[in-house]
Amino acid sequence: MITLVESGIYTVEEASRLLQTTPKKIRGWIDGYPRTKAAPVLINDLGWLKRSLAFSFANLMEMRFIEFFAARGVRVSSMRSMAEEAQRMLDHPHPFATNTIFTTDGQKIFAKVASEAGDPRLYDLKEKNWAMLPIIEQSLLKDTQYNPAGDAVLWKPRVNVAPHVIIHPARSFGQPILAESGVPTRTVNEAWEAEGDIDVVAKWFQIKKKQVLEAVEFEQRLAMAA
């Protein structure tokens, strides 16, 4: 059984900051929609902790999936049934947080699955049948690492800007950190804002200046996009 230390712990506000989307969307995906009484899209691993809505790293990766495909035209309201079908087909509570390749035509989501002969096939999660359509592949795999079971275990949220910044559910409760030292990027950025000297901050945390710059750049970009 996974523990809180291993699962990562995120609030609505933290997920909104990392995924660059609104708290309202996050809350609906994970906790449902009180006005319409619609159910949540995802299965929450954690629930309410100390009067705050909390969820796991796997849930965070699923939210990233939803945001990615919603931006490509897929209606979030239709993702609920597709998520349920993916859970059934893959026999996994969090299929959108695995290394399964999913694609879209802008309305439906397809799972790429190998046939018994080893040939790739597309399964239509909405119509619940096999598709023969040519689909432009959309993938979230390039900046995520997976364990042998295919579950996401590490995310590099801004790999092009800050390649040493990672999110790992079992390190610093899943907050963004510098991979080698484990120092949270928010801590590095706060030190730089207080001191204003990259060399001094690097000495404080015994890290390279380049990694200070990465942490600051990472945090500054999140703040500008908020």
Image (cartoon, rainbow, N blue to C red):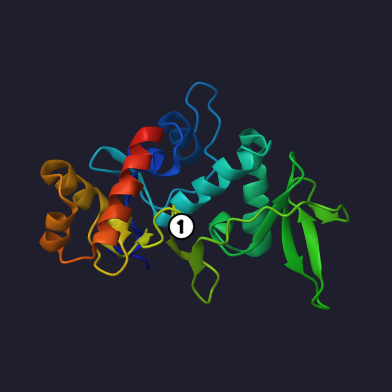
Tell me the quadrant of the picture where the C terminus can be found: top left
At 36% from the left and 63% from the top, the residue drawn is 164
Where is residue 25? Give x, y as percent.
Answer: 48, 32
> Can you say whether 127 is above or below 32 in the image?
below
At 18% from the left and 47% from the top, the residue drawn is 192
Q: Mark 1 falls on what kind of element?
A: loop
> Amino acid type of disc 1?
Val
In this rendered view, identify the residue nearer to me: 226 or 59. Answer: 226
- Would you identify the image quadrant in which residue 114 lies? bottom right
At 39% from the left and 53% from the top, the residue drawn is 56
Q: Total number of numbered labels?
A: 1
Q: Is residue 175 visible?
A: no
Question: Badge 1: how crowded within 10 Å, few (<14), some, or many (20+)?
Answer: some
Q: Left or right: 42 with respect to 212? A: right
At 24% from the left and 67% from the top, the residue drawn is 181
Where is residue 182? Give x, y as percent.
Answer: 25, 64
- Would you identify the image quadrant in which residue 120 lies? bottom right
Tell me the quadrant of the picture where the N terminus can be found: bottom left
Q: Left or right: 208 with respect to 139? A: left
> Can you say whether 178 is above or below 225 in the image?
below
Q: Is residue 200 visible?
A: yes
Where is residue 21? Give x, y as percent.
Answer: 46, 35
Q: Which residue is mark 1?
A: 159
**Residue at far top of view:** 35
Where is residue 162? Give x, y as percent.
Answer: 39, 56
> Can you say whether 90 is above or below 55 in the image?
below
In this rendered view, identify the residue nearer to me: 179 or 14. Answer: 179
> Can you say whether 76 is above or below 35 in the image?
below
